Amino acid sequence: MKTYLVTGGAGFIGASFVKLLLKQYTDIRVVVLDALTYAGNLGTIVSDIEDPRCEFVKGDICDKVLADELFVKYNFNYVVNFAAESHVDRSIENPQLFLITNILGTQNLLDAARKHWVTGKDENGYPTWKEGVKFHQVSTDEVYGSLGAEGYFTETTPLDPRSPYSASKTSADLFVQAYNETFKMPVTTTRCSNNYGPYHFPEKLIPLIIKNILEGKSLPVYGDGTNVRDWLYVEDHCKAIDMVVNNGRVGQVYNVGGHNEKQNIEIVMLTISTIRDLMTETPAYREVLKKKEIINGEISIEWINENLITYVADRLGHDQRYAIDPTKIKNELGWVPETMFAEGIVKTIRWYLENQAWVEEVASGDYQKYYDKMYSK
Ligand code: NAD
Ligand code: TYD
């Protein structure tokens, strides 16, 4: 039986990974370590932690004593580190928190793993490691910086982070690589493009646009809306991580992306038209609209159109374009994305229409304060 420590497992991607593990493997134990910050929510994994194979621990990845206790208690085979402060806009407001969680937190986990996984020394003085253990770091394409109109990020593209978020993720990646070089620690890293799907916190572009439409609010587009992101359905990302944890070569980095570049304005337009289509096909979905205009006895959706778009001040240091070349993971491990964007975006929007209770719950904390501060500028 393999025992996984999944940090950040109550967040968007970590939770999807926990669900995938529990679905895919029977003989498994999953320990979720999550601090339940504003971005983490037990409602996201409530059915998973009821499973006897899964345990939830509320705690901080920076907590040395706790990390130590968990390694002693559970004897992990794998650590998969999702826990992070993940929002670029928040990193511009409070860079230090990103440094603490993303860099110091990762380094704390690396040290805990080193303490418990090292079995001795080889003839050259390097540590020897327990059979089959691995530390997997979940990273981002943002470590490579920003592209112009042409080209793709490969694993050899120089690291060139430009936001406090990406600088902190890059630094964590370098520590992971350093532990591999210095201590021969068995590590792998994945660098993925923008994810979308269910349980995405509504401060990020796609869920924020959906939420605002349902509330009849304007749709904030930064700058001129031409910035490009390379979107991947969250389950495809998690399948890639699973493959790398099991079969990825130690010490290697794998880029993950599905060749699905879209300008932000295209994403916003597509979200508007998909919501209209779904509400035309299934009029009952209109009940979730907070703005209810009754025309000819039915809830109107005529006002859901591009007039809702508002161009707002650009993000400071806004990266222009991200685009991943996934050739390495495809050739070495056979990973290919399974959910095409046209299908994934409909699945995602349908999920939000049917799970408004989740949105209301996660947005009930300091979300409104954050939103008012962020978008009143
Ligand atoms: P998220 O913000 O939705 O979730 C992060 C989770 O980490 C939350 O549950 C939060 O409570 C937890 N957390 C934060 N600080 C913690 C701490 N100190 N100790 C323990 N838990 C803590 O983020 P996400 O979008 O799910 O991203 C997960 C990982 O994937 C991150 O490392 C991120 O950098 C990376 N990533 C994200 C994307 C994307 O598009 N969202 C793309 C590529 C890589
Ligand atoms: P985001 O979802 O924050 O992801 P990231 O910055 O990590 O790529 O943003 C995606 C893109 O959408 C990015 O170019 C910024 C833009 N954006 C807006 O135009 N309006 C918004 O309200 C938000 C949150 C993002």
Image (spheres, helix red, strand yellow):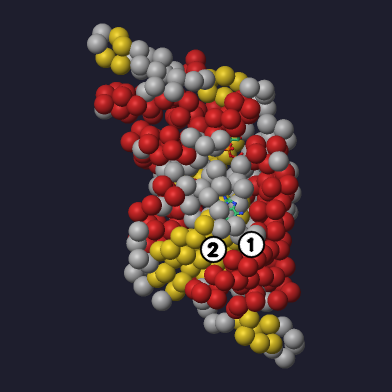
The residue at 44%/74% (across/down) is 2
Query: In which quarter of the view is residue 215 placed?
Result: top left
Please, is residue 148 above or below residue 374 in the view? below
Q: Position of residue 370 (x, y in %)?
A: 60, 32
> In the drawing, does residue 151 fall left or right of residue 234?
right
The residue at 41%/76% (across/down) is 1
Q: Residue furthest top?
A: 296
Using the image as rendered, state which of residue 157 and residue 353 is in the foreground: 353
Asked if the residue at label 1 sits under 8 Å from ligand 1, the reply is: yes
Query: In which quarter of the view is residue 51 placed?
Result: bottom left
Residue type indicated by callout 2: Val
Q: Which residue is mark 2?
A: 80
The residue at 65%/66% (across/down) is 64
Dot 1 crowding, Cα within 10 Å, few <14, some 14–19, many 20+? few
Asked if the residue at label 2 sits under 8 Å from ligand 1, the reply is: no
Q: Disc 2 vs disc 1: Cβ atoms closer than 8 Å?
A: no
Please, is residue 45 above or below residue 273 in the view? below
Q: CA distance from mark 2 to mark 1?
A: 17 Å
Q: Position of residue 363 (x, y in %)?
A: 49, 35
Residue type indicated by callout 1: Asp
Residue 183: in sight, yes or no?
A: yes
Residue 63's label in the rendered image is 1
Dot 2 crowding, Cα within 10 Å, few <14, some 14–19, many 20+? many
Q: Earlier in the sequence, mark 2 or mark 1?
A: 1
Using the image as rendered, state which of residue 227 and residue 57 is in the foreground: 57
Q: Position of residue 82 (x, y in %)?
A: 55, 56
Please, is residue 310 above or below residue 23 in the view? above
